[in-house]
Image (cartoon, rainbow, N blue to C red):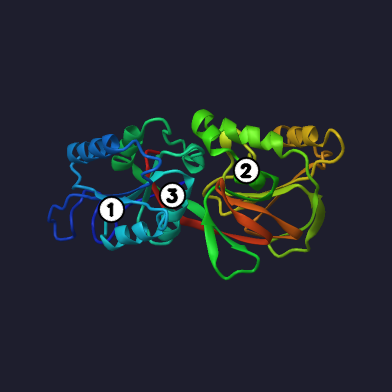
Amino acid sequence: MTENNPALDGKTPEGTTPDGTTQPRRAAVIINPMKSSGEDFKAAFHRLCETQGWAEPLWLETTAEDTGLGQAREALEAEVDVVIAAGGDGTVRCVAEILAGTGTPMGLVPMGTGNLLARNLGIDITDPVAASHDILTGTDAKVDVVKASLDHSEDEQLFLVMAGLGYDAAIMANTVDGLKDRVGWLAYVEAGIRHLPGKPVKAKISIDGQHPVRRRIRSVMVGNCGKIMGGVEVFPDAKLDDGILDVVILAPAGKLGWLTVLAGVFGRKNSKNTSVEYFRGKSAEIELDHEQEFQLDGDHTGKAKHLKVTVEHEALTVRMTV
């Protein structure tokens, strides 16, 4: 990832204005109260800001009606120095959607089950206070974001890690919440086993507007970075700042179909394995002959039969220790 010199709204990294007046830096925390550890983290974060010489933070809680978009806009209007997404991947996506292209850095305090972007960035997912310290003392890096359009809609949705049509999205749609609370990401394994049976769907996949390939598939996934739950590296060549999308098609066939898929994912050097195919480009368009479940960064968002995705190179600034 590319580091840059964080100078936002006329303020230097040291917290001074151009005329030399000292001005303490300020963070905004956009937090999902359903994911957080309550007042303990809030008190700890306030103490951390005080010890690091930061001003009292702007504290904004998400709601069922507004899961982060409005709060991120409020943080931008307050001209804070960093906007921290404290929650799961859904909170991170909402905050990133507003911050992308603004230059205002986003920090991550992982509090969800997947924490996909945090895992790929090497951010501490076990200690919210430690992750917060790394944000307040860290530097900036630029990462790519991906815009997704469903069923030819003009409304685009942003994702940072991965989007999927088919089997992987069905897992996200049918994971048992109570089990997820008890065993974490292993709940997705249970859902995956339940959904192994199923029929393939006809698909056309076009990369960078080229002539489409036609396949019968169970899943198509588009990756901006490599790792998913359990540390599985579905896209080994993917990098968050390379301006390239990685697309994988899963097409199990026969009684041992899913075993060949596993062999293809974990042993990509076998070019004869047609159960798993990889493509790369700056954009991709996927069209299915009937609707399939759809997910963005592990969040099930409905069904679709057409998906168009485009990468926006280094559109988002992330604040962390690198």
What amino acid is found at the position of numbered circle 2 in the picture? Answer: Asn
Question: Quick check: 5 above or below 236?
Answer: below
Q: Residue 31, position in %: x, y?
A: 35, 47
Question: Quick check: 193 above or below 83?
Answer: above
| Mark sitting on residue 174 | 2
Disc 2 and disc 1: Cα gap in Å?
Answer: 39 Å
Disc 3 and disc 1: Cα gap in Å?
Answer: 19 Å
Q: Count residues near mark 3 (Cα–Cα under 10 Å), then give few for <14, some for 14-19, many for 20+.
A: many
> Is residue 23 visible in this depiction of the protein?
yes
What amino acid is found at the position of numbered circle 3 in the picture? Answer: Thr
Q: Residue 221, position in %: x, y?
A: 66, 49
**Residue at 59% across / 41% down in the picture?**
226
User: Who comes first in sequence, dot 2 or dot 3?
Assistant: 3
**Residue at 63% across / 39% down in the picture?**
236
Considering every residue shown, the one lying at the far bottom of the view is 154
* Residue that badge 1 annotates: 81
* Residue that badge 3 annotates: 91
Out of 303 and 283, give the one closest to the viewer.
303
